[in-house]
Structure formats: C-alpha cells, structure tokens
C-alpha cells in the first residue's frame, strides 16, 4: 500500500518553488553567460540557403542522370555491336574507346573554366554592359567570340534576369539559324558567354555597303530570319530586339540570329523582373506618342537617295550608343499594351523594308519622332516610287507592319512562309543552298567585316576561375556555369563522339 502511495505521489505535478535571493543572483549570472538569442534569419540569408539547397539538389540530380545516361549509351553500343557481328576483340577496343571518351567528358565537366583558358584577341563589339572579342582556346586552338558582361552594371540597370534568360535560351535552342553557346562562366566582376564566332559581319554592315539588296537577296535573308525567329518561338521565347545589327553572317554568308539580351519567355513567372526594351515609354506616354502636332523643326521632305545618305550617316552612332535605335520596335511594345510573339514579326517587316528601300520605314531625326511615327504607322508607312518594290513585296511588308489582329505570323510562321513573295522557296534545304552573298573572309581570325575598337588603356584584373552565381542569382537558375555539350552519340559501329 505504501509502495502504491509513493508511486502516486511521484506522478503528481510538483509545485514550483520560488527561488530565493541567492538563487536569483546565481540564475542571473548564468543568464549573462549564455549567448544572446539571434534574430530570425534575414531574407538575404533565406535566399542564400534556398540557392544552396537548390544547387546541391541539382548537382546530385545531374550526377544520377549522368550515370543513367552513361549506362544507356554503353548498353546501346553493346547492342549495336552485337547486331553488327563484330569480333570480340574489336568489341572490347570500341568499348574501351567509349570509356576513354566518357572519362574525358567527365573531366571537362569538372574543370572550372576561366579567362585563363583562352587567348584574348581582337575586340569586335562594345556596349553598355561590356564587350565582345575574338578568343582562342589555349588547349584546343578553337576560335570563339567571348561576350564579357560587367556584373555591377547589370545589377545597376536591373538586367540580371535578362542575361539569365539569354543564357537559358542559347542552351535550349539548337538551330542552324541561332548563334551557338559553347561555355558560360563568371569571375568576381564579369560574366562570360563563349559563343560561336561568325566572321562575315552583320546585316547592318552589309546594308551600309550595298545600300539596298535585290529582291532575291532580300528573300533569302528574310527567309533565314523567319526560320530563326520560328526556332525561338517554338521554345516559347520572344526575342524583342530583331534588327540588322543582330543578324550575323557566317563565312559562307548564311545568317544566324544573335544577341538575346532582351529575350523574354512567354511564361515569365521564372523571370519576374524582366524589364521592357529601352524605348518603351511609361504608361502615361501614350498621349505623347499619339500626338501628331508638327514639331518645331519638321523633318524636310527628302528623296530616297537623300534619306538613305542621312540614315547611313547616323546609323553607326545609333548602333553603338547606349540606347540604340527604336526603328524596329512594334507599336504595342512602345505603348505597353501587352504583347506576344507577334512583335518579332513586326521587326521582320521593318528589316525587309530597309533591305529593299535602304532605310527603315519610320526613320526620323530623333528617337521620339520615330516612336511617334511607329505608333501612328497608318499615316507614315509609305513606299517610295524610286525603290520599285514588287506588288508581292509591298503586300508582305504591309501585312507585317500592321495591327496585331491582322499581322501575319500571329498563328505561326507558316502564315508567312505561305505568302506569294516566297513562292518556290525550299525551306527545308535553305541552309544547304548557296547563300545570296558570300563575305570576304581570309581566315578564321579575320575581323575585316567588323568595326575596329581600341583596347582600354587599363584592363581590369579579375580572378580567372569560375563558380556558381551564388551572389547574383538567388532564383532557381543558380548554376549559370556549365558546358552545353550534347550527350555522346554513336556515329557508326566503330566510332563514338562527344558533340559540342
């Protein structure tokens, strides 16, 4: 009985005894020795934790996928060799060759690439965020174009999301009409995109040399531009900056679309901070753009030749200024009414007009006047008689430079391909036909088709090795660094190659 009572007493909650003065002082002394309780983590810390977690998860996910891919490649090769009835010795040699290439591929993936891996050569472009120069891989000898972007300037102008979207698009899209991205990395001050070098120059330079293109020449390059735009639209991106400066020519004269710094995914939830193109006025600017009152110094009436000379005189300055030119921007973009892929087809119409006439359809003395003309395009879209455009060419331009609801391309590129101006065009074989113009290129390092730029007197020293964008990219695309190699593919029974 006593035993049961004692257990019962133990189970009863004990009353708290108030500490005496001595115990209080001892407790205070202990509290002083304890470290202070820290506040809740800041948003920046939370972002860093999320980024680190995402990076680690992606790393191990990629490792497992890479292992599965290697197993599948080996299994496919073994199956193909068995079907081809290759001797046992030859099978072993080919499988050893595969293992060697797989090992080399993994070694390349582990290598932290940096500026030290390239020999820096001539500058071929310079802009608000950095420069583009020719470079050569020290180990391979391959020639590339290195796009170098200054981090601080992009942060100041809110362009981080844009360069992320550019890198993602270049890594996703595989088209002969899109400039290729081979590597991407960063150091403390710059981001680097190592891209395909196209020595033929750009369409702007070609147009300035030739004034205008013939109907056949224009048809060829407009067709290649259609295929380039179609390839990015299939991946749900809008380019938003289609202009002759961004249409580059390879050494054979074929055109590739470049500069995706303003590209925007249709699903922009992944890139919530994408800003509008430079010449997109605010919401309250609609009345200013719609205003048709004559300015203090109206643009004089010029002949086609005079207008062409005036355009060419100012074109270089506009191309390399920090604000660029609004001549190819669609009216819905300028008015911020909301827009989709159709805005790229408007730009195509403006380029086609320039190819055949010699200058853009809404060219003016100053950018705001150009914007005003674009918004009021019905009053300003005119075809000079001296240009002698064919009825089909006028019709296509008119059906591209119009309101969105009537614009060709709103239901896909097929609408444009089916236009009579392209009658007889062999779209599937276009890239394998002879180009309309073959640029003069002496060797793989030739830069004669680009503008000359002076080297800066005091080049900034940067750390050469790369790492993930832990400081700049807290969103899901934290691992900017990477190769864009495709998987190893079996070329034939006796050869396995890694495609870059």
Image (spheres, rainbow, N blue to C red):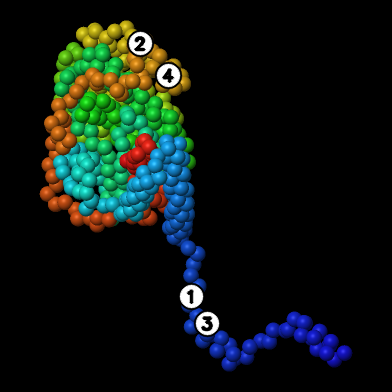
Q: What element carries label 3?
A: helix
Which residue is nearer to you in this view: 256 or 346?
256
Marks 1 and 3, the one that precedes in the sequence? 3
Q: Is mark 4 on a helix, strand or loop?
A: helix
Viewer-nearest of discs 4 and 1:
4
Residue located beneath label 2 in the image: 423
User: Is mark 3 in CB contact (under 8 Å) with mark 2?
Assistant: no
The image position of residue 8, as x and y in percent, is: 81, 84
Find the distance from the CA under tag 3 to the CA under tag 2: 87 Å
Residue located beneath label 3 in the image: 31
Quarter of the image containing the C terminus?
top left
Residue 374, visible in the rendered structure: no
Q: Residue at x 21, y 40 (%)?
A: 143
10 Å crowding of disc 1: few (<14), some (14-19), many (20+): few
Q: Examine the image and state in which quarter residue 295 appears.
A: top left
User: Is mark 3 in CB contact (under 8 Å) with mark 4?
Assistant: no
Find the distance from the CA under tag 3 to the CA under tag 4: 76 Å
Residue located beneath label 4 in the image: 414
Marks 4 and 1, the one that precedes in the sequence? 1
The image position of residue 22, as x and y in percent, is: 58, 92
Marks 3 and 4, the one that precedes in the sequence? 3
Q: Say which mark, if any, is on residue 19.
A: none
10 Å crowding of disc 2: few (<14), some (14-19), many (20+): few
Which residue is nearer to you in this view: 303 or 270?
270
Residue located beneath label 1 in the image: 36
Marks 3 and 2, the one that precedes in the sequence? 3
């Amino acid at each position: 009985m006593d035993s049961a009572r004692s257990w019962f007493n133990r189970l009863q909650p004990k009353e708290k005894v108030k500490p005496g003065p001595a115990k209080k002082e001892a407790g205070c002394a202990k509290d002083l020795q304890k470290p202070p309780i820290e506040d809740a983590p800041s948003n920046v810390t939370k972002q860093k934790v999320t980024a680190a977690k995402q990076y680690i998860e992606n790393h191990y996910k990629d490792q497992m996928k890479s292992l599965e891919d290697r197993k599948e490649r080996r299994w496919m090769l073994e199956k193909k060799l068995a079907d081809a009835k290759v001797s046992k010795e030859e099978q072993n040699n080919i499988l050893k060759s595969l293992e060697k290439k797989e090992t080399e591929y993994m070694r390349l993936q582990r290598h932290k690439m940096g500026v030290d891996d390239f020999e820096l050569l001539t500058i071929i472009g310079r802009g608000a965020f950095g420069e583009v120069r020719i470079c050569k891989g020290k180990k391979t000898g391959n020639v590339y174009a290195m796009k170098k972007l200054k981090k601080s300037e992009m942060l100041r102008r809110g362009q981080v999301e844009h360069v992320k979207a550019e890198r993602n698009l270049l890594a996703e899209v595989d088209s002969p009409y899109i400039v290729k991205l081979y590597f991407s990395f960063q150091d403390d001050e710059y981001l680097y995109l190592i891209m395909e070098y196209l020595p033929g120059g750009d369409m702007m330079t070609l147009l300035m040399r030739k004034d205008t293109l013939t109907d056949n020449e224009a048809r060829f390059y407009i067709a290649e531009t259609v295929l380039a735009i179609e390839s990015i639209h299939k991946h749900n991106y809008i380019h938003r900056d289609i202009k002759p400066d961004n249409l580059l020519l390879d050494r054979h004269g074929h055109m590739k679309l470049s500069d995706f710094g303003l590209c925007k995914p249709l699903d922009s939830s992944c890139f919530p901070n994408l800003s509008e193109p430079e010449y997109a006025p605010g919401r309250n600017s609609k009345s200013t753009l719609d205003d048709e009152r004559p300015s203090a110094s109206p643009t004089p009436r010029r002949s086609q030749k005079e207008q062409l000379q005036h355009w060419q005189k100012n074109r270089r300055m506009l191309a390399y200024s920090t604000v660029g030119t609004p001549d190819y921007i669609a009216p819905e973009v300028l008015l911020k009414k909301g827009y989709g892929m159709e805005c790229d087809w408007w730009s195509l119409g403006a380029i086609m007009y320039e190819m055949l006439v010699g200058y853009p359809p809404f060219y003016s003395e100053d950018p705001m006047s150009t914007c005003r003309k674009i918004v009021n395009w019905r009053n300003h879209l005119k075809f000079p008689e001296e240009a002698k455009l064919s009825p089909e060419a006028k019709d296509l331009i008119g059906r591209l430079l119009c309101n969105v609801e009537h614009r060709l391309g709103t239901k896909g590129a097929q609408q444009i391909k089916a236009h009579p101006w392209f009658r007889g065009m062999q779209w599937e074989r276009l890239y394998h036909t002879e180009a309309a113009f073959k640029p003069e290129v002496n060797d793989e390092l030739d830069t004669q088709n680009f503008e000359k730029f002076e080297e800066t007197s005091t080049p900034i020293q940067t750390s050469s090795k790369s790492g993930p964008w832990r400081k700049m990219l807290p969103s899901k695309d934290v691992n900017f660094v990477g190769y864009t190699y495709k998987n190893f593919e079996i070329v034939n029974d006796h050869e396995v190659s890694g495609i870059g």
